[in-house]
Image (cartoon, rainbow, N blue to C red):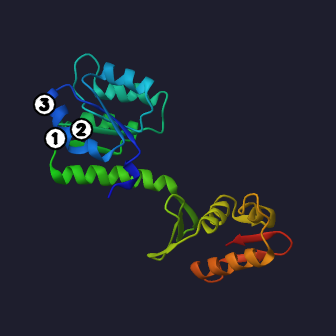
Amino acid sequence: MYKYLKEKTVLYIEDEKAIRDNVTELISEHFAHFYTASSAEEGYKIFQNESINIIITDIEMASMSGLDLLEKIRETDNKIHLVVMSAHTKIEYLLEAIPFKLEQYVVKPLTSKKIRELLTTLNLAFSSVNLVELTPNLMLNKESSLLYFNQKEESLTKKERDFLAILADKKSISYDEIDRLWGNEVPSQNAVRSMIKKLRRKLPEKILKTRTGFGYYIE
């Protein structure tokens, strides 16, 4: 269900062992690796030595708080996904957390609904990394090779996906770039025309234009 999380690594920081063990049991199965730490200092060492995709942390801990930890992490990493899991709902905590661009602020105690919401939020955060826009209403998912238009979904072949990924990046694709989609092979004109014809059927009408002597573009 949460396929984008299956290869991700989590660092979970919580100073209360009972809570730490309970949360680990509830959500760790959805990730490839799940590290735990009992203090912000221990968590920071793990962050420095391991490849972490997601950090989930409590706020009020001895010595260094969770917010202090997140501030320290953001000094060197702007891409890691951050989640606060705390029993505290003080407005000053919420305001202090805003600059760290949290994926979610989860209020304890953890319920099955909150678990689903957290996992869904994280899954969407990683799936959006693979989403690219061709036009305002046309989206390509490079990871799943799916094309989305007006709430419709089309499956793409690898060549079709790579063709559209180049278009999404540059808004055009040359004949040389199309030939390279076949790797070490040299495609025949019929093979290229066949791929383009099939792809046009999956795209909105008239969106893929031909540029004579160059290749294709979208508008």
Disc 3 and disc 1: Cα gap in Å? 13 Å
Q: Amino acid at mark 2?
A: Met
Q: Amino acid at mark 3?
A: Ala
Label number found at residue 108: 1
Disc 1 and disc 2: Cα gap in Å? 7 Å
Whether the residues at callouts 1 and 2 have beta carbons within 8 Å, the answer is yes
- Mark 1 surroundings within 10 Å by alpha-carbon count, few (fewer than 14), some (14 through 19), many (20 or more): some
The picture places residue 196, in percent across and down from the top left corner, at 69, 76
Q: Closer to the camera, 5 or 116?
A: 5
Going by the image, does 183 lie left or right of 62?
Answer: right
Q: Secondary structure at mark 2?
A: strand
Quarter residue 113 falls in: bottom left
Give the answer, above or below, for where 132 lies relative to 217.
above
Chain-order first, disc 3 or disc 1: 3
Residue at 43 percent across and 50 percent down: it is 126
Q: Amino acid at mark 1?
A: Lys
Chain-order first, disc 1 or disc 2: 2
Q: Closer to the camera, 25 or 101?
A: 25
Outermost residue, front side: 185
In front: mark 2 or mark 3? 3
Q: Which quarter of the rendered picture does the N terminus lie within? A: bottom left
Label number found at residue 85: 2
Residue under numbered circle 3: 18
Residue at 46 percent across and 55 percent down: it is 128
Q: Which quarter of the rendered picture does the C terminus lie within? A: bottom right
Going by the image, does 213 lie left or right of 78?
Answer: right
Give the answer, above or below, for where 72 lies relative to 155.
above
